[in-house]
Image (cartoon, rainbow, N blue to C red):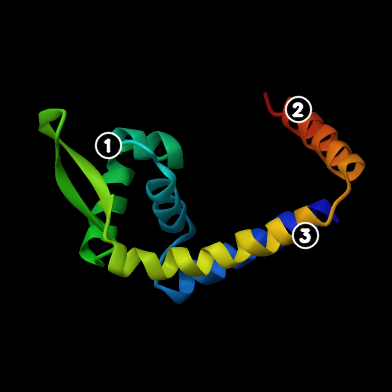
Amino acid sequence: MFKRVVQEALNFDRDLASEYGLALTDLMCLIFLEASTEPVSAKMLAEHVTLSTGATTALIDRLEREGFIERRPNPNDRRGVIIALVPERAGRVLDDQRALSLRLRAAYDELSVQDVDGMMRFMHRLLEGNE
């Protein structure tokens, strides 16, 4: 059942990305940029999506060409640039992606404290195997 839930979430994101002509990694990038509380450099983005610098440059070029992001001068480093969302374009994708988050949150809110504790123990055990 857990695998099915994970697969459904991935399918939702993959289908959503495809609807906007994006790859799943592109969508991950947009979600990361929206969630970030600080200016995001290409290096930070590469680390988050676990791509090489060359692949990240191609990702940024593609998203910029499609109007989802833009490069801006880094206010803290004259030589650098930061990657920023273009709200008009990226906002639509991210609004649609929030629908899944809201659905998951609604399901979570219906759980008892004991259910949540059990799920957390289960997830911690899963993650321990990957460290």
> What secondary structure is marked by label 2?
loop
> What secondary structure is marked by label 3?
helix
How far apart are the two marked residues, 3 and 1, measured between alpha carbons?
35 Å
In the displayed orientation, state which residue is furthest to the left: 78
- Give how far across and how far down residue 117 sits, in percent: 86, 36
How far apart are the two marked residues, 2 and 3, measured between alpha carbons?
26 Å
Residues packed near mark 3 inside 10 Å, few (<14), some (14 to 19) or many (20 plus): few
Residue kind at label 3, given as amino acid type = Ala
In the displayed orientation, state which residue is furthest to the bottom: 19
> Depth check: 33 or 28 in front?
33
Residues packed near mark 2 inside 10 Å, few (<14), some (14 to 19) or many (20 plus): few
Residue kind at label 2, given as amino acid type = Gly
Residue wearing tag 2: 129
Q: Earlier in the sequence, mark 2 or mark 1?
A: 1
Which quadrant holds the N terminus? bottom right
How far apart are the two marked residues, 2 and 1, measured between alpha carbons?
31 Å
Residue wearing tag 1: 41
Q: Answer whether residue 62 is visible to the viewer in this image.
A: yes
**What residue do we see at 47% from left, 71% from top?**
18
Answer above or below: position of 129 versus 51. above
| Left or right, 84 with reference to 94 | left
Residue kind at label 1, given as amino acid type = Ser
Q: Earlier in the sequence, mark 2 or mark 3?
A: 3
Which quadrant holds the C terminus? top right
Answer above or below: position of 98 versus 125. below
Residue wearing tag 3: 107
- Between label 3 and label 1, give the one nearer the viewer: 3
- Which quadrant of the figure has residue 70? bottom left
Marks 2/1 in contact by CB < 8 Å: the verdict is no
Answer above or below: position of 130 versus 103. above
- Give how far across and how far down residue 65 sits, in percent: 21, 64
- Between label 2 and label 3, give the one nearer the viewer: 3
